[in-house]
Amino acid sequence: MNVLGENRRFSVAILISCLPLVPITFFDLRVSQLVADSENVVGKFISDYGQLPGYILIFCALCFLFVAASSVIEKISYSPFLVIFVLITFADLVEYLNTVIAGFVLLLVAILATLISLRLKKNETVLQFSRITALLAVITPLFMVQTLKWLWGRTRFRDLSSDFSDFTLWFLPQGPTVHRSFPSGHAAMGWMLLPLVLLANSPKQLLIISKLVIFWGILVSAGRVVSGAHYLSDVYLSMLMSIWTFVILKIRLTRLPYSGRDYSGRVSRHV
């Protein structure tokens, strides 16, 4: 009965979080018309670097999982994903830096991630953080977002005709096209920092990390709307997918923070 009640509350919470999509549907195009500016500094910055923190976090998590793996089979299973995100991160860096500098930055991150992983490979908190980060990366930006982009074929605001006649509502898929507006990959990568809250050792740390994660997620999402690359509905759906996927993974793979576990990792007797 308790499980059923929790499932109901969880479903209600998801439905409530979807309610803003009702007004967004009616004002989606209008918001973009009001705020879109291809020369906006924030929009340009987010377009260039908005995904980078997420890529680096995923790369570090995969490095930790690879180093902490106790068997060759485990290491082999992590290797393809590690290679994929190394290539994606390198491609993202090369777009804005020259090849040598991009390679140096990536090598430096790899060395630091490996050294940290060797030091913390037996830390259960970091292990759980890395598992959730890796799964969130595969499920949301890599699978869900890219699949929906291909199926929806929604035209970006900056690519609309002058009379906006080719604008489509977010819930109407157009089928595979060259357009990839819905949902936002940048926004999904912006919210990839969510697992950082798992590393908090106190309520104060949790508050600080949560504020930084929310700030970055909103900044990346807003930057994509301002740049004309996405509509408000694109980034809002990416946010919902990222948050709820993270919550589900956290419930499945680890305890909720501060419910029956003290900061030393021991389980309370009162649970």
Image (tube, helix red, strand yellow):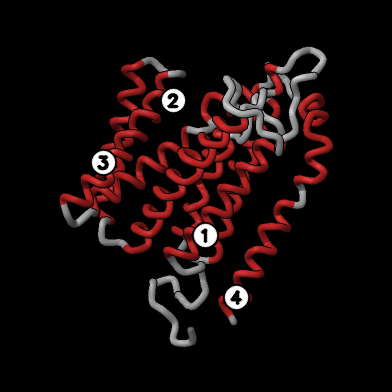
Q: For residue 63, what is the image quadrant? A: top left
| Cα distance in 3D space between marks 4 and 1 | 16 Å
Q: Which residue is drawn at 58% across and 52% down?
A: 243
Compared across the picture, whether 117 is left or right of 236 comes to left
Badge 1 amino acid: Ile
Badge 2 amino acid: Asp
Picture coordinates of residue 124, whole percent (x, y): 33, 63
Q: Which residue is drawn at 52% across and 74% down?
A: 259
Mark 3 vs mark 4: in front: 4
Mark 2 vs mark 1: in front: 1
Q: For residue 237, what is the image quadrant? A: top right
Mark 4 vs mark 1: in front: 4
Q: Mark 2 points at which residue?
A: 92
Which SS class for mark 1? helix
Asked if residue 188 can be seen in this view, the reply is yes
Q: Residue 248 carries which label?
A: 1
| Cα distance in 3D space between marks 4 and 2 | 44 Å
Mark 3 vs mark 2: in front: 3
Q: Which mark is residue 4?
A: 4
